[in-house]
Amino acid sequence: MDDVMLKTDQADRLARLRAELKRLGVDGVLVPRADAHQGEYVPASAQRLAWLTGFTGSAGLAIVLAERAALFVDGRYTLQAQDQVDAGLYAHRHISEQPATEWIAANLPKGAVLGYDPWLHTPGELERYRAAAERAGGSMRALAANPIDAIWTDRPGPPLAPVVPHDLRFAGKAAAEKRREVAAALAKDAIDAAVLTAPDSIAWLLNIRGGDVPHTPLPLSFAILHGDARVELFIDRRKLASGTEAHLGPEVTIAEPDALGPALDRLGAAKRRVLADPAMSAVWVFDRLAAAGARVHRAADPCQLPKACKNAVELAGTRAAHRRDGAALTRFLAWLARAASNGALSEIAASDELEKFRRGGENFRDLSFPTISGAGANGAIVHYHATPRTERRLEPGTLYLVDSGAQYLDGTTDVTRTVAIGAPSPEMRDRFTRVLKGHIALALCHFPKGTSGSQLDALARRALWEAGLDYDHGTGHGVGSYLGVHEGPQRISKLPSAQPLLPGMIVSNEPGYYKTGAYGIRIENLVVVTKLPPDGAEREMLGFETITLAPIDRACIEPALLDPREVAWLDAYHARVGREITPLVDPATAEWLAAATAPLRP
């Protein structure tokens, strides 16, 4: 799909959609950036929002009515939406400050019917939209087929990437053992079966990996885990590589995806108590189970929490992956110090070079997401994607933000560094140091067992808040083990969260600051939640082990803003980076690294 869609194309597609809605007898439709699995990672065949509007961000919603339409995105994508989507066709709205429900209540005509695809919304989402439609005097209707599919004439087919076993030496626990443990947990709650619609849950549970979406080894599929630890896997058989069926074993039966409905009907006919996750599963699943007579138990996907708490083998693997990844990033940063000196280096050339350094690494399989390579003002666009039309050169006196990562068989990485090209201004140094102070505050934090990420988020923002500054994204997201670079249920965010941070969870530590039209700053390491020694504590205490290993640009730091404890953390971190990375790089890079990791105050 082209990165930039012509306004005439956007207008034509919108007009064709409105004609299709009229044919269907509805007055509008919801167009989310979603697929039937309700995940962040969406295959090309389900990129309906991008096809219709031109918006290519990873989260968004369009609402199309007969006379007006609106696009809703969060703070990460406001600038991108302005660049990609014709404001004459779609009103642009910040989804948290101007919720879609309010727009529906204010704009849906009385008596109008708002259509929706039941595969693309969770029950909670739909309940909110339905309430808004009723406030407007309208109603909502489930559509038998998505209306965009009827007009998207060159729509790609469903993905057919090979599905392969994930070796036990990386997974750390056999699939049969995982199935028994999760099934035993279901039995404690008198649950007969659980419907799994999240591909990352299925990949973890069955120790398989795929390639149906870019940069994340997901096998798009559905599954039913029964109380006796049997699994019904609903997947296109053409995707199963040689040996995968044998790996799955006789307790995993395989059926085509369209067999899911009849399987749910059987559970209903037997009056089974069936778990489905209302936050992760489509309303279609709940409607089908209810219609079949099942006793539906709404609860969290039972695989998400054990998947998030990595076992010892997974943690050892991710530490090894981060050492190799840190060496690749360090070689890149040393190269960048030379290549960017004349101001001729472009964003795309820089990110291409970083990818080359990573690709030679042991167990490398792919990038974990498209690299964010933003120079100057482009660095202020949180999820910026460089194109030949938008890219800038890394010019002296500017900041360069590079957010990148890789998928290795033994771990998933995600790291951001902000680098001064030439001499940074005093304002840049001030803002960078405030972001660094927040990063260090989180890295040093000790907290009692039971603490959630939302309780820690303010630590990363305090130094920015003291100067009247902030950032519009979360401070930390979960990270998988050769799975999603974003995973739940853990997070560090302003948003409320009841999920405590638990030992073995991997989460990012990434405060930032973004000055629109000028520069962006983010410092991101991945950390593991660990148990702390008692040391006289009255409660069980936890902390963070930083596993990302790459230098933080000392040229951007204003030392006077750091207190002695912060300086000690930075110097200790840099000393560790030097010890662990120097043996993995060439002599020229090692010489650069020695200077880059020197103590801040000799």
Image (tube, helix red, strand yellow):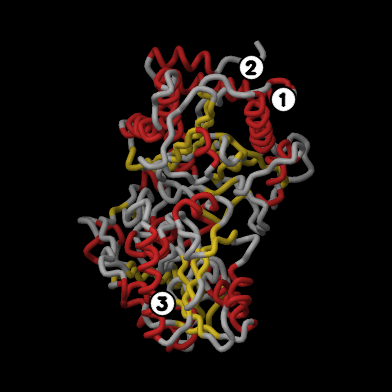
Question: Crowdedness of circle 2 by 10 Å Cα count: few (<14), some, many (20+)?
Answer: some
> Where residue 139 sits in the image (x, y, percent)?
55, 85
Question: Compared with residue 138, is residue 359 higher up or lower down, i.e. above or below?
Answer: above
Q: Nearer the viewer, residue 303 or 567?
A: 567
For the N terminus, which image quadrant? bottom left
| Residue plotted at (63% across, 76% down) | 106
Decide if residue 285 is in sight here.
no
**Residue depicted at 73% across the width and 36% down the height:** 463
Query: Residue 388 or 522: which is nearer the viewer?
Result: 388
Earlier along the polypeptide chain: callout 1 or callout 3? 3
Horizontal arrangement in the rendering, residue 493 relative to residue 244 (left or right) = right
Tell me the amino acid under the disc marked 3: Arg
102 in relation to 305, above or below = below
User: Distance from label 1 to label 2 (Cα)?
Assistant: 10 Å
The disc label shown at residue 352, or none: none
Q: Quadrant of the C terminus?
A: top right
Mark 2 or 3 closer to N-term? Answer: 3
Tag nearer the camera, 2 or 3: 3
User: Which of 385 and 517 lies nearest the eye of the viewer?
Assistant: 517
Alpha-carbon span between mark 2 and mark 3 = 61 Å
- Disc 1 crowd rating (10 Å Cα; few below 14, some 14-19, many 20+) is some
Q: Front-most of 495 and 130?
A: 130
Residue to which mark 3 is pinned: 18
Q: Does dot 2 land on a helix, a strand or a loop?
A: loop
Dot 3: element:
helix
- 1 or 3: mark nearer the eye: 3
Q: Are marks 1 and 2 in contact (CB under 8 Å)?
A: yes
Mark pair 1, 3: CA separation: 57 Å
Q: Which residue is mark 1?
A: 562
Where residue 322 appears, as percent x and y from the top left, is 45, 34
Residue labelled with disc 2: 600
Q: Residue at x 38, y 83 (%)?
A: 144
